[in-house]
Amino acid sequence: MKWVLYACSIGLVVGAVAVAFHYGIDWATELRTEKPWIIWLLPVGGLSIVLLYRVCGMERDRGTNLVLVAVREAEPMKLRTAPLIFLSTIITHLVGGSAGREGAALQLGGSLAAWIGRRIRLDAKDSRLMVMCGMAAAFSALFGTPLTAAIFAMEVVSVGVMYYAAIVPCVTAALVALQVAQFCGLHGTVGYEAGTPAALTPTAMLQVAALGVLCALVSILFCKAMHAAPHLYGKYFPNPLVRVAVGGLLVLALTFLVGSQDYNGAGDLMIRRMLAGETVPEAFLLKILFTAITLGAGFRGGEIVPVLFTGCAFGTWMGPMLGLPHGFSGALGMAAVFCGATNCPISSVLLAFELFGGESLALYALCCGVSYMLSGYYGLYSEQKIVYSKFKTEWVDRKAK
């Protein structure tokens, strides 16, 4: 009863904040769409984000990595993380940086839940559960996928170990947060239209497995780019203000070279266009480049929707070459690249179920499983721990790279 009460409270509070965050992102995206000239403010937006974190004494903030450490080691999270990630992610989307919002939601929900846990004097172990509840609630309210949100919060911290003690609190918080979001007018319809999936046949299994192998390579490329960008910026532009201004100019230059703003922001509309039949062979590489330059420079936001964009773009290009239906290939790519990048196979299968329905779910599971196994020990989050080997029943206990 205690945890049902705590989880419901977290779902209500974090759900309400996440709804405001959702509308803030939508406002920023719509304003930039109506007034494309706003993209010229990319360097100014980046400078404002860095200065905002500096004024609040959070220059060394580790982003989502801190949330993972807070769950695994009960490291305290500051309440100021919530308003900072709230405002800075909206600024990033407003000026056209390539970033998502669900990754930022993990920080938003985790910091709010951690603060509530301190206010009611929870011990270290209970505080970890509260942070996971906050992660699940924010993810669910923003994306409308409560099962994925709950399991992702339990699965992402330590690969190979599930925090089963958190299942009731996380599911409860995710469902309550979703109800809050729906009450406020969000997620009337959840999911994407991906066309007719392939039937479960031996041929389809081989085709899907082959796509899973390739998606594992794409996920490795995405992770390596995301980790390499900050190091390159730090090497050539050690001053954070210069770094973010240069990053803004680079994104601006890339946008004009591409000739459209399809790769700015999260890219949800582009995902829907690709699932509906559009094919852009180079789109997955461009999205990786845009996102690495944006977040590596110091802009704030999430990585999850850019990962889904990358997977969809790659799947809709490569899948038909393997003989798979176009839209179904994009859906497989979204789930499999997400799986390879986050090392969360159960969450990835649930994501496919909640976004695309249960038809041919076994093929999604096969594609995600192959991508998980072959993506090695790479991951979006450097503080994520790989506890068990992906290839043998042995303890490895290493951080993702």
Image: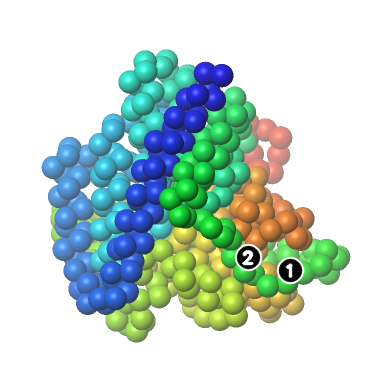
Q: Residues within 10 Å of mark 1 (few under 14, many from 20)?
A: some
Q: Amino acid at mark 2?
A: Ala
The residue closer to the viewer here, 57 or 180, is 180
The residue pinned by badge 2 equals 331
The residue at 50%/66% (across/down) is 309
Vertical comparison of 129 with 372: above or below? above
SS category of the residue bearing label 1: loop
Q: Relative to 163, is 302 on the left or the right? A: left
What residue did someone put label 1 on?
Answer: 197
Image position of 225 (left or right of 377): left
Q: Is residue 232 above or below residue 78?
A: below
Give the quarter of the image for residue 358: bottom right
Report if the CB atoms under discs 1 and 2 are less than 8 Å apart.
yes
Q: Earlier in the sequence, mark 1 or mark 2?
A: 1
Residue 172 image position (x, y, % from top left): 56, 33
- Residue 68 at x, y percent in the picture: 44, 36
Q: Would residue 330 be visible to someone looking at this image? A: yes
Look at the image and tell me in which quarter the N terminus lies. top right
Instruction: Say what secondary structure mark 2 lies in.
Output: helix
